[in-house]
Image (cartoon, rainbow, N blue to C red):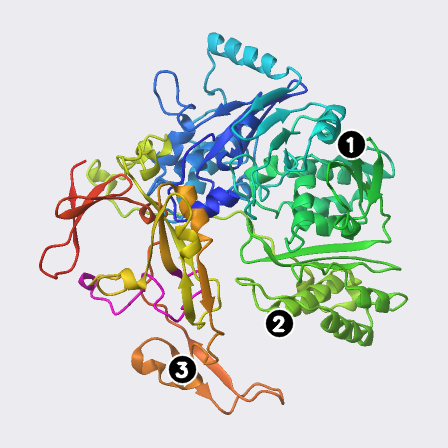
Amino acid sequence: MIGRKHTSPERKECVLKGGCGTCLVAVEEKVNNQRNVFAVNSCLVSIFSCHGWKIHTIEGIRGEDGTYHPIQKILAENNGTQCGFCSPGMVMNMFALHESGPITKLQLEDSFDCNLCRCTGYRPILTAFKTLASDADKESESIDIEDIRPCQTSKCLEKCEEKCKKAQEPGYFYNLRGSKWMKVYNLNDLLEVLRTLRNTNYMLVGETQQKEAVFFVLGAYRPITVPDAYIDITSVAELTTYLFQKDYLVLGGNIALNAAIAIFIRISKESSNFAYLAKVGNHINLVANLPVRNIGTIAGNLMLKHKHNDFPSDIFLLLETYEAVIFIVDTEGNETMTSAKDFLKVDMTKKVIKNIIFRSFDDSYKYVTYKIMMRAKNTHALVNAAGNIVQSARIIYGAINPSFVHATSTENYLIGKNLFDNNVLKSAYQALDRELKPDWVLPDPKPEFRKLLAISLFYKAVLNIAPSDMLSSRMKSGATILQRPVSSGTQEFGTNKTKYPVGEPIPKIEAYAQTSGEAEYIADMPDLPYQLFAAFVTAKAAPNSTILKVDATAALKVPGVVAFFDKSDIPGENTFMPPILLTPIKEEIFCSGIIQYYDQPVGLIVATNHDVAVNAAELVEVTYSAPLKKPLLTIHEVLDAKAIDKVHLTFTLLPKRKGTDIKHVVKGTFDLGLQYHFHMELQCCNVVPTEDSLDIYRPRNIWICHKPLLQRPYYFRPISK
C-alpha cells in the first residue's frame, strides 16, 4: 500500500471506507499531455494501480534542502494542529487542490469533506488554507507559493519524465502469490482477457467505487474470497471518454465521479435541454468524499448496487430517475441496453458496463432530487429520493428496502391528475403511505421515520415545482435546500503587544513535525517480537436487548487466534472509569448482559496479526433476546429527573397550543454532563508487560501505568522517551 498507516479508533472505518482522510497522498499524472493532480486515499489504492503515477507524500513535498513546504508552514503557524494525526492528510489534500489550479474559499471548504479532525476543530485549519484561495484577501496572505513546487531540479524532472514514458507501454502482468494482476489499455484486450479466464473469480480494478474492494483493501462489504485475477481497467480509453451530441450524452462507464461532475456542469451550460445535468452533478457531489470521487467510477457504484441490492446508491437512483440507458458488452462484443432498474437482474459474469447514455429533456420536464443525511457530506443517505413529473410521473426512492425502487402505485395515480390540487396531494400521500414499507436493519433509523421522511420529500418536490403564485412565502421556504455560505471564525488573543515576546502567540514546538509527517505514532513503531493484536467483538442488537450466549468456538479455531476475553475475564470492576477521576460515570469495558448501545464491546479477540483478529471477531456468535419493552426514560423518571440532576423538564396537562389531538406537552431544557474529548490518536497504544508494571506507548509520548501491590487506583507518570 502507499501512504501512511492508521492508528485511529476509526481504523476499521478508514481501512474499509477511506473515511478519515489521514492517509491522503497526491497523485500526478499526464492525460493528453495535460498535468493532472488529485488526492487519493492510499488505503483504497493498490500499489499496482500506481503504474504511471507520480506520488507526492507528506514527507516528499519538502524542499531538497529540508525546508518545510509553504503549506506545511501555513498550517503549523496558524495553530492548525493538536494531536497532529490528521495533519498530513489535510496538507496533502490542500497540496493537490492548489496544484490543480485556482480554487475559491467556497470550493476549498467543499473539498475537505474527506478529512476528519476530532480535536483541533476546523476553524484554524480553514483559516490557514483560505489564505491560498483565489478570492482570499491578498493583504492577509502570509506566503506566496505560486512558484514553489517540490522536485523541480532538471535531473529529477528528466528522471520522472523517463518513468512516465515507460508507464505508457501497453499492458503489464504480475504473478502474485495466489493471484494474478494485469493491466489493459483497450476494450478488446479487456474482453480477450475475460474470455481466457478459466473461472469467474476475478475483479475489475478501476470499475470500483470506494466501497468495492481493491487489492488488499476491504470495502463496505467484506469480500468472502480473494480473487484469482485482478484486471486493472483504469486506462481503457473506451471506458474513460465521452461523446456529446445534440440529443444525447454518452459517458464511458469507467469515468470517475468527479470527472463526470465536471462534464455535467459544462454540458448543462452549453445546452438548455441538458440543464438537468447540473442538478445531477450537484447530487453526485454529495456521494462519498473528494478523493473517493477522484477514483470512484459510475460503473463501480452500479456494480456495488448490483451485488448488494440493499446498498443506497445515489448513482443508481439518478440513472433510473432520468431514464438513462446502460450499455453492457460481453466477451463476444455483443452489446445490450438496459435501464438501471432492469440492470439489477442482468447476469454480469464476464460482462462490462461500457457506456451510460443520458438523453435530452425540454423545459416541460420538472425534476428534483434529494439526499437526506446525518451530516452534510461523506455519509450514506437516510433516504434519497428523486422525481421527474410531467404527463407521466417517476417517483423513486432509495434506502427503503433492497427491492424497492419506484413508488408505482402513486405514479399511476398521478397520471392525468392536477398535481397542485390539495385533494390529489392528500390521496398521493395516502398511496405513498401504503406502498412504502421500509425495512429495519440496525443501525438504520426506524422505518416509521424513514417513511415519513420519504413522504415529506415528495411534498418538498411538489413545492419546488409549483408555480410561485400558488405558494405563500412560508410555503416557498419549504421548497428550498439549505445552502451553507462560506464559514467564518476569529480568535482573539488577550495579550499586550508592548510586552512581546512575553505572551506572544507562537506555533507550538511539535507543529512542524506534525504537518511534515515527522511525528511518530504507534503504527510508525516497528512490531515487537511476539507482539499480539486485538479486535473488539461488538453487539449487533438494539439497546436493552439481553445477551443470552457468547460462543467463540469458531473464532478460536482460526490459525493465529490466541484468546478470547469478555466480562468474566475482568479481574476487578468492569468499568473504564478509574476511581481517581471522582466521577459517578460507570462505563462498562465489556457488556455485562444488557446492551446499552449498538456496537457496544462484548469481548476481545487476540491474535498474532491484525487481519486475523478482525476476521476472527466476526466469527464469534452472540445470541440475544428481544429488547426490553421498558423505555430508556419513563415519564415518571422525567418528573423525578430534577432530583437526580440529569434532565430538567416540566410537564403540563393543560397545553395552550391549539389542537384537539394534543394530550400532553413536554417542554424544558436538556443538560448534558461530562463528555469525553474524542481525539483519534489516544485510542490506540502498544502495551508491553514488564516485571512489575505495564509500559504503555502512546502517540508522541511514552507513559508507564503502574499497578501497585496494594489495591490502589491506577496512576500515570510520564517518562522521557
* Residue 709 picture location, percent across and down: 9, 56
Q: Is residue 693 magenta?
A: no
Q: Secondary structure at mark 1?
A: loop
As drawn, the label of residue 638 is 3
Whether tag 1 and tag 3 are in contact, CB under 8 A, the answer is no
416 left or right, relative to 327: right
Q: Which residue is mark 2?
A: 448
Q: Can residue 372 be seen at all in this image of the molecule?
A: yes
Q: Nearer the viewer, mark 1 or mark 3?
A: 1
* Residue 487 picture location, percent across and down: 50, 48
Which residue is at the front of the view, 187 or 504? 187
Query: Would you call the spot at circle 2 few (<14 residues within 10 Å), some (14-19), or many (20 or more)?
Result: some
The amino acid type of the residue labelled 3 equals: Val
Q: Is residue 599 magenta?
A: yes
Kindly give the residue lying farthest to the left in the view shown.
710
143 left or right, relative to 437: left
Query: Would you call the spot at circle 1 few (<14 residues within 10 Å), some (14-19), or many (20 or more)?
Result: some
Mark 1 or 2 closer to N-term? 1
Q: Is residue 106 above or below residue 189?
A: below
Q: Is residue 610 above or below residue 50?
A: below
Mark 1 or 3 closer to N-term? 1
The amino acid type of the residue labelled 2 equals: Glu
State which region is magenta: 579-601
